[in-house]
Amino acid sequence: MKLYEFEGHKLLNDGGIESPFFVVCKNTEQVKASRAKFKFPVVGKVQVLSGRRGKNGGVVVFAREAQLLEFAKKYIGCDFPPNGEAGLAEKVRFIMVAQKVDIEAEFYVSITYDTARRTPFLLFSEAGGVEIEEMTRKGVEVVRIDIDPTVGPKKTDFRKMLLPFEFVEKLWQVFMGNDARLVEINPLVKTKEGKLVALDAKVILDDNGMARQANLDVLPKGAASAVPTKRELEAKKIDETDYRGSAGSAFIELPGDIAILASGGGASLLVMDGVTAAGGQPANYTEYSGNPSRGKVEKLTALTLDKKDISGCLVCGAFANFTDIYETLGGFADALAKMKDKPKYPIVVRRGGPRQTEAYEMLRKLAKKVGLDIHLYGPETPISVAAKEVVRLSNNFQTRNSKHEIRNKK
């Protein structure tokens, strides 16, 4: 879960790392009310989960109240960036007003995980305010220090760094104590009074650790947008009380019309890539993996197919060694059988694994009984071919529907 900047600052403050004084505002009236708490100049910051706010005009220093109010009116409730690609812009819910700080020096510092080495590490650079990717391209020196998670930072490793070891320990506690995947301060500044102050706060939490962070005061986030949709929230509840496999923990609503039920891991990405490469537009991204119960897959299927204007459905994944295909596709069939309005759009299933033959026979019987357009493929059919097929069938379905609508209008 990626946090808003102000949420990241709160975690840093709780860990003893200072931030500039700030106020978070939901509307222009709150911006006006905050005026009495500041001395100008102040910094106005759009609060979105995407990056590059500064380059897109979302971080501005203001010398007068009128300028700040115009900034708030421009962005609150609107898409950011204003000219962003359709479907990718994010609705601005908050503006942060922060006291401007007199800066003597800027640094970059972060702690994150190296999944290849399976260890957390700290990055530090004296080129604060510059994105880490840009530092790498320009050859700016970036110091990396691996941290043993069982003992934490060692003072001897940080002797030559321009950071007090006490600060490193505080940052480490924020990282570990909140089950974070990333804690990044860019820039961390040294003020003219000699204080270290976090001017920005980028924090990403590990979703798998959220059960241990029940008291964490952060807003719920969607995956494709800042505000989770009703279906995204409902999907996450499926796994909360049943730990048999996974169904719904990863659920992202997308603007397309082809419903996807993928089997997790790299196969899910192949499915999504295959559909988009064939010219289709996924309506969602979700996974059911491991060995989820029939009931969990039924709930996930019902949520996935509840979306309006679906023109096709693809159930697809790699060959399973341990997943009971009959059990999981049984959940899929149960959801179809219970739908009041049975799908008229094509359904493509490409699975393989234990009890696949029984599962496919069950789906054939259901299709014949209730009139479903189901196309079944085994593991000998490449995922890319199954993806092309659902796109082709979906296009044909839309064409037939369009002609039918024209005839009805006549």
Image (cartoon, rainbow, N blue to C red):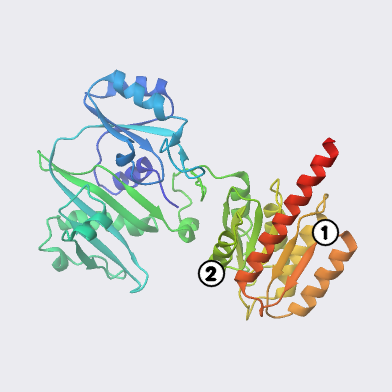
- Name of the residue lying farthest toward the right: 369
Where does residue 100 sit, x and y in percent of width and height? 21, 32
Residue 16 appears left or right of 285: left
The residue at the point 87 percent across, 59 percent down is: 371
How many residues crowd mark 2 within 10 Å: few (<14), some (14–19), many (20+)? few
Residue 296 in sight: no
Residue 406 appears left or right of 325: right
Q: Is residue 189 above or below residue 268?
A: above
Look at mark 2 in the image and give the residue it sits on: 265
Where does residue 27 sit, x and y in percent of width and height? 43, 25
- Disc 1 marks a residue whose amino acid type is Ala
Look at mark 1 in the image and give the residue it sits on: 337
Whole-number angstrom distance, CA of label 2 to CA of label 1: 28 Å
Where does residue 293 sit, x and y in percent of width and height? 69, 67
Where does residue 164 sit, x and y in percent of width and height? 14, 55
The mark nearer the N terminus, 2 or 1, is 2
Q: Is residue 3 above or below residue 70?
A: below
How many residues crowd mark 1 within 10 Å: few (<14), some (14–19), many (20+)? some
- Disc 2 marks a residue whose amino acid type is Gly
Q: Quadrant of residue 397?
A: bottom right
